[in-house]
Image (tube, coloured by chain):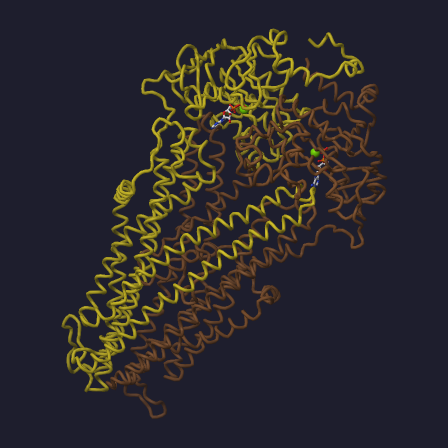
Chain colours: A brown, B yellow
Amino acid sequence: MISKLHKRIHRAASRNGGTLGYPDAVANPQSRRRVVARQKEQGKSAPSDADTSQLTHAEFDERGAEMRPLEFGLIARVFAYMRPYRARRNWLLLIVLVRSLQIPALAALFTHVINGPLIARDVRGTLLGAAAFLLLAIFTQVTLHFRSRWALELGEAVVHDLRRDVFAHLQKMTMSFYHRTPVGRIISRMTSDIEVVRSLVQDVLFMSMVNVGQMIFAAAVMFWYDRVLFLMILGLAPILWGLNFYFRRRLSKALRAAQESFSRVTSTLAESVSGIRVTQSFVRQNFNSRLFLSQVVDHSNFNMQAAQKSGALPPLLELNNQFFMVGLLLFGGYRILGPGVGAEIAPVRAEALVGYYLMSATFFSPLATIGNIYNQALAAMAGAERVFQLLDTPPEFADKPDAIALPPIEGRIEFRDLSFGYDPDHLVLHDINFVAEPGQTVALVGHTGSGKSSLIQLISKFYLPTSGQLLIDGQEIRDIQSASLHRQMGIVSQVNFLFTGTVMENIRVGRPDATDEEVMEAARRLDVIDLIETMPEGFHASVGERGEGVSLGQRQIICFVRAMLANPRIMILDEATSSVDTMTELRLQNALATLLKDRTSFVVAHRLSTIQDADTVLVLDGGRIVERGNHHQLLGEGGVYANLYRQFVQATAV
Amino acid sequence: MSPSSTSESNSPAPVATVSNWTLIKRMLGLAWIYRWGCIKVLLLQVAVLSLGLMALGLFGLGVDIIQFHINPKAKVPAYPLGLQPPPDMPVMNVVFLIAAAMLVLALLRAALTYQYALASNHLVQSEIVVDLRAQVYAKLQRISFRFFDTNETGSIINRVTGDVQNVRLFVDGVLLQTVVLVLSVSVYLFYMLHIHVMLTLACLASTPLLVVSTWLYMKKVKPATLKTRELSDVMVRTLSENIQGIQVVKGFARENEEIAKFAQANRNVREQQNWTFWLTSVFSPLTSFIPQLNLVVLLCYGGYLLTHDPTFTLGQGIIVFAGLLRQFEGQVTTIATIANSAQQSLTGAQRVFEILDAPVEIQSKPDAVRVLKARGTVRFENVTFGYRAEEPVLQNIDFEVPAGSSIALTGANGGGKSSLLSLISRFYDPDQGRILLDGVDLRDLDVDDLRRSIGLVFQESFLFSHTVAANIAFGYPRATREQIEQAARIASAHDFIMELPDGYDTILGERGNGLSGGQRQRLAIARAILLDPPILLLDDPTAAIDPETEHEILEAMQSAMQNRTSFVVAHRLSTLRRADRVIVLEHGRIVESGTPDELAENSSFYQQATTTQAPDEESLRLLGLDLEARV
Ligand SMILES: Nc1ncnc2c1ncn2[C@@H]1O[C@H](COP(=O)(O)OP(=O)(O)O)[C@@H](O)[C@H]1O
Ligand SMILES: Nc1ncnc2c1ncn2[C@@H]1O[C@H](COP(=O)(O)OP(=O)(O)O)[C@@H](O)[C@H]1O
Ligand SMILES: [Mg+2]
Ligand SMILES: [Mg+2]
């Protein structure tokens, strides 16, 4: 439930493009690209290589995330993921090269038409030039189509494969990993971190190549037009680059602060919504509203700070363009008209001014884009590193290569001098020795934290013993293939976990190849089929995250039937009935007896009444078996168990 | 969750889907509140636009002057505003002047652009959004529970975050943008027409195509991205379920099936993405091709004009025109964006106004009776109640609890026990019949007073991520430390609180993480009795607690219930026995009621409960407990 909430919040926050409070490029004539890019970003598709040439607010939102220096190893690893698609990749590289020539070529061609036939009033030449321009333009757009589609698809393919690998890797991880790692963290590896790796392929790699190429060619053409003017441009370029760098750095800091304040807003909000009953019953509405207002104002202040930083960059970039135009006029004019034109420098032609004016855009805009891409790359490094770190975390243990597949087992389970600790320095089970004969029911009793669940985790091979042995039908558990053991085991625990899907599908988790009839038969054998059939759609009612209409008792029953269907040799019930009400519990007790019959079973129950029928009761205290025997024997001993039981009787009966 | 979902409930004024026109009118009203800010933003924007145009014009002029100077055959540059420089002025000086003017314009423009960014951010994020969020939140605090019953948490949160942003988008993204669009397009158009009418028409012939294709793209790509989002939600859900259910997955050796399931979800995302990519990479070349087409037209027709029209120049003609074209096209494509924003803001407005307009069902009447200290007699008179019409959850409930006595409610899950309690706090009003406190109908009482007279403990108590003290003082933030400790003592919570790292100042994790179930419930009991309420409602407070620690709470409950009218939902015989009266609810009806002893005699429910919870005789003998002593 909590994680569901988080997911929602996360989604709510991430959907909300404007949250971080950037004025959408409201009305700046140059802002078209910004808006378009933003929408494309929302649609998770990368824009064409020209489209991110402006700052986009949406980019800021994401780029506010963590960054890491560029690292060759990581890039190479991402590159390795393209290997299955290398034909596509090589074509793409070729197209990138073509495109970086095309864009300056278009500008150059336009310039030439103006400077040549147009000024010379050569109509035929102009028309020819225009036709050439048209052809080149069409060609450019066709390559753009392939450049963008292939890069996008390649990125998606890499992301797809990465997800596949991460998921498969996760299935190999042992329980200790899942106990250690919050769900949210694993999910964000798979979502936001992998998303930035996508941008590494889709945008960073190929777009930066196009842009760098474009700059180089534009520079070459301008150099060819006029060397002195070119020097001027070269002087402006580092200023532009520096500005970009400086502002983005400061901005990403401000953005992080804004993001943090926003997550405070959403978490307050989430808490207020979940705690609304408490709020209203304690008449706290006004107080809460004031508190929330102060947080919202706080967030908007952080937003303003970020806006002060983000707002400064576009005008400065624009100013740079204007300076360039002024410089062009002044410097060009001086060179053309001024007195000091020596013979050593060829006088600049007026047409070169036009050429420079038109070419400068193809030279300058990549600068901003590359700044952008660079930041994206840094964020991608952080994401890629985390993803690969997860992939590189080895499972704590895996089946030995020569592990044997268990044949159908009898169900004799033996603990020999077994000790166990989640952390080897802190044992939670000490010197456990006992044997459960096939078909016996073993009840585990003890205070919370005494080690009951831990013992069960060991039988399930979710953890390996720290020392000593655990034998199943005489086989050391370390030498057994986990899957072959799990297939003969049924576990019902306190968390009645159900997958999204129908009741039928959830029961079938126990044995995927079971027919509908077999599923119903299992329910019948447990004598709970009527309880399932009273649900709105019976076996086809949907449950899981969305199936909120299913009561706890019903969930519990589904879990029982699921275990029953698996027809396991070993059955484990860990506090399976602790969350149902008395009446339902009564119903379940019969089902339970059927479930445990003829199987080796381990039962942990809080209601001691469920334990009376067990063959053996093990009383655990501080990780040691302190008493063993059947119910009546233990009562007769008058020890820990008898005390527990007395407390229970008194609670129910006094 | 559909925006109109609350209309399913039988709330008195169901919120119908409001027409778009009504929404637009309301949003215009909203914009009117911020008119000065809007005007400021607009003026800045207009200034920025005009400065840009001037700079472009000056550059054209400069090119023409130079051209004219080195090539006297070229056309005479046209000076704006009749500002002809004196004929004896050196050309270099004229160029210098122009450059200086451009520089000034550029600086001014940069400053104004910056101001514009700040002003619009301030308007939008510091005024509109803050105000709207505060309003929506304040309303959420008061709105009736039916709203929370029918809307998921995520959707409610989204209304305060995303939907509010969408509503403000109407002001900046739709309203202001449209004005700017109209203004700037007219200015560009005027300027271009001024340069040459036919050339303008020729170059703009393809503009409708640009508008249509951008619009078409948005139209197509929107459902595609929605679908992508849905599919990736499925993928993420598959993953998160896998992790949350990892024990089931491993326990039933389901890893391979899970991998296959995920692979399917993963593949679906990829295929859908590729379709979106295809759309994007078809439309984006198309939209960038049309401007290039216009350049071709400009070259051909402009070239023709250059030779045939004596007033047409290279700088002020072609170059300026090319610049204008670019700006014009840029503006025109925002039409589609504006349309999109409008759509978005309408959906947002629907959901935001739904909250702002929702009636506060439970409200004090103007002449409500104040209760400063109730005695605590509670009487249900033939009460019938349901969350949905036609589906009563409680039927004909009729009983009275004298002040100071305790009543236990029991029965199977879903019987209506919690619903009955929430009627006492007036979280809902009964559909029929009435509930009286000290002889006064709850609906005639001041709601805040009523709720302050009631202490409430839930099945699983919600604690906030504050300090322990703040949580206990939740209902009365001004409580002194003595009062807080006093309440904690009654709830047997003082001792464990003192053992926490910072005692009463220990900050609890989200939802009270870091405390055991029993500790959480004892804090909740302390919170409920801080104000010494005459009525106490305990809704199955031991349900989520293991029996070993249960007795700790039972003690706290007992001392809290002393001298109060208390309602306690319970299943344990021990608790039922202590009540003055027991009511068994089944399917919303009282099926049995009486003193515990009466019920022990002749209640079938009671007897069933006794047999499940009772130990066998042999066990009792072994424990040395006498059978007779039990009753
Ligand atoms: N995943 C885990 N990592 C580390 N310690 C754990 C983990 N699970 C349980 N423990 C510790 O092991 C001890 C035994 O716990 P557990 O077996 O769950 O007891 P029980 O089921 O009897 O309540 C406790 O001290 C508990 O804190
Ligand atoms: N917020 C709600 N909206 C709609 N139906 C509800 C709501 N809360 C409870 N119900 C329904 O009302 C009935 C009584 O529920 P409840 O009062 O919680 O019973 P109990 O507390 O006895 O378990 C159940 O059928 C339940 O599904
Ligand atoms: Mg346990
Ligand atoms: Mg209830």
Against A76, is A176 above or below? above
**Residue lying farthest to the bottom in this orientation:** A343
Q: Quadrant of residue A590?
A: top right
Horizontal arrangement in the rendering, residue A186 relative to residue A34 (left or right)? right
Q: Is residue A45 left or right of residue A405?
A: left
Which sits in the foreground, A46 or A545?
A545
Q: Position of residue A654 (x, y in %)?
A: 68, 13
Residue drawn at (79%, 15%) of the image: B618
Left/right placement of residue B77 relative to residue B436 reads: left
Q: Which x, y percent locates residue B544? A: 61, 28
Closer to the camera in the image, B403 or B198: B198
- Identify the residue at horizontal 54%, vertical 12% (top origin): B563
Residue at left offset 70%, top offset 33% = A574
Q: Is residue A409 left or right of residue B3?
A: right
Q: Could you tell me if residue B529 is visible in this image?
A: no
Number of callouts:
0
Whether residue A449 is visible to the viewer of this picture, yes or no, is: yes
Instruction: Give residue A438's position: percent from left, percent from top.
Output: 82, 34
- Quarter of the view holding residue B106: bottom left
Q: Is residue B624 shown above or below B553?
A: above
Q: Quadrant of the N terminus of chain B?
A: top left
Q: Quadrant of the C terminus of chain B?
A: top right
